[in-house]
Image (cartoon, rainbow, N blue to C red):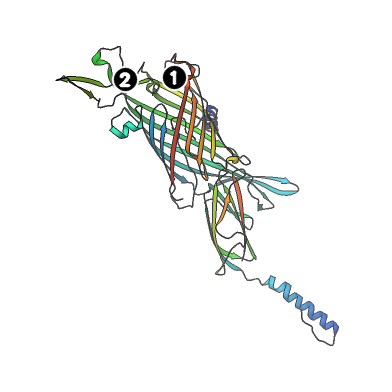
Amino acid sequence: MRRLLFLSLILLGSQAAKAQDFFSDRNNTGTPVHFIRQSDTTKILLFNAGVNVSDAAAVKLNIFNQKWSKSAGQTKTALQRDGKDSVIVKSTYSAFGWGAFGNIKTKAGLGKVFKSGKFDPGFDGGLYLALTSFYLKQDSVNGQMRPPRSSTNSTLILSGNIGFAKNLLYDPKQDFGKQLKTENFTAPSIGLGYVYQPALKHDNLFVGGSATYKRVSNYDDLDTYEIKNDSSYTDNGITRHATKISPDGDTYAMGEYRTYWDLRLRGNISYIPRSFNYRFGFNLYPSVDVGGPYAARWNAGVGFSYLKDNNPSLSIVSLNIEVNDIGDAEGSGKGFFKHSFKVGISTNLNLITGQ
Amino acid sequence: MGRFYTKSGIFQNTFLISLKIRILVIPKLFTMAKQVVFNSNVGGAQFVIYSVQGQQVSAGPSALHFNQQFNDSMLVVGISISAPNGTLCTVTYQCSSNGQPTADPAKPSPVNILIKQFNTATVTLQIPI
């Protein structure tokens, strides 16, 4: 009983945390889950490749594999309805899935990465586990099963990842020879997300929350400069300029560089109306960041997603608009619009085997 | 019914009653059970519940297979599907009765169904056997 109470408190806590990563955010950091079957034996794998442009450009690869339980559980509640023996049958069916992802990003821009192969690289990769349960409610009257009344779904997602970045920093206050430096940054994180899909008459709604504890840096928020070492040589009236390119790239960030542990609590409401034939999703995701040298930073985001046909949970293109650190707890002094307003566009190619 | 020539009307009535009994009652008493083989699969669904003649027979897996005897003249298979609204699911099935292929005349395989309400839909197959 005590164990059950403890488990209930954990689940309530995760719901109260209000957030999830069912749809991606501005940086395309979602953990896509896909629980659909073509048959009991068909292997279904979701391959997801995404390109994201925001503060930094990124390429993401994702895979998700699903495994279904063999049978369903049932509870029956007997009652009398209109003088007939009626039974409410609640069936529960579960599935488990795992996913893996890798994400390469660069502050210098993707074009530069592919052109020269030299960039300020950032890589993160991770694994996630998803446990989902479907609940189907139907009536049995006089021993005859009736069509189900509704179906709901709950999904729990546990994710862990680690990121590596080689952050290039420019500090003009230092001696000339020490102005350019490279900081290696390792960023582990762990997250727990929950998504609930209630049964709406025609539309789809996903409500959830997540808590993510991660090591972060403010590198993406710093201003960037292109720095090259030029040398001039003059001979017989001809001046030649030679530019030495840093082997790590030539885009450097300037400003006060910080790393710290951050706890992000995020809420998420995703709404997919029937009126657009289930092809458009609207996403609202407020969040708060706690940790580091700052006071709590409040954020909010809205997303507009164009969804995959017949799979109303997979995004093909999404536009995300966020206002981050609304109160400027980080003290950037840049003004609200410049400091807080962020836009990201992500496009994803979703391939599903077995379909 | 043809005419029956007898001298006695009583005998004629008795004969007719007897014939009615033969036609209406005897076949029911001695109905031959039919060997029915049924296979089906639902593609695109998350959770499937099958019922046969109103009795739930499977919950969870997307496929159903059975090979058994039925006395009824109609096989009724209910397929309840769970998936988000807007999901297109496809039911494929094959059925034979005493080795003869048969199908629901109103819903030949494959049956496409778009989930539109409360994340669920039901397909009821009525297959003469």
Is residue A135 depicted above or below B62 in this figure?
Answer: above
Question: To which quarter of the image does residue A254 belong?
Answer: top left
Mark 1 packing: few (<14 Cα in 10 Å), some, or many (20+)? some
Residue displayed at 46% across by 25% down: A342
In the visual, does A116 lie left or right of A236?
right
Chain of residue at mark 1: A
Residue behind mark 2: A169
Asked if marks 2 and 1 fall on the same chain, the answer is: yes
Report how many numbered discs are placed on residues in the image. Answer: 2
Residue displayed at 58% across by 51% down: B113
Q: Secondary structure at mark 1?
A: loop
**Residue B103: percent from the left, percent from the top?**
59, 63
Residue behind mark 1: A291
Quadrant where the image shows the N terminus of chain A: top right
Mark 2 packing: few (<14 Cα in 10 Å), some, or many (20+)? many
Residue displayed at 43% across by 30% down: A27
**Residue A134: percent from the left, percent from the top?**
55, 42
Looking at this view, name the residue that lies furthest to the front: A237
Q: Nearer the viewer, residue B127 or A319?
A: A319
Question: To which quarter of the image does residue A240 belong?
Answer: top left
Chain of residue at mark 2: A
Q: Amino acid at mark 1?
A: Gly
Residue A215 is marked as none
**Residue A32: percent from the left, percent from the top?**
46, 38
Q: Amino acid at mark 2?
A: Leu
Q: Earlier in the sequence, mark 2 or mark 1?
A: 2
Q: Nearer the viewer, residue A324 or A298?
A: A324
Q: Which callout, 2 or 1, points to the residue nearer the camera?
A: 2
Residue displayed at 58% across by 40% down: A276
Asked whether disc 2 touches disc 1, contact meaning CB atoms under 8 Å apart, the reply is no
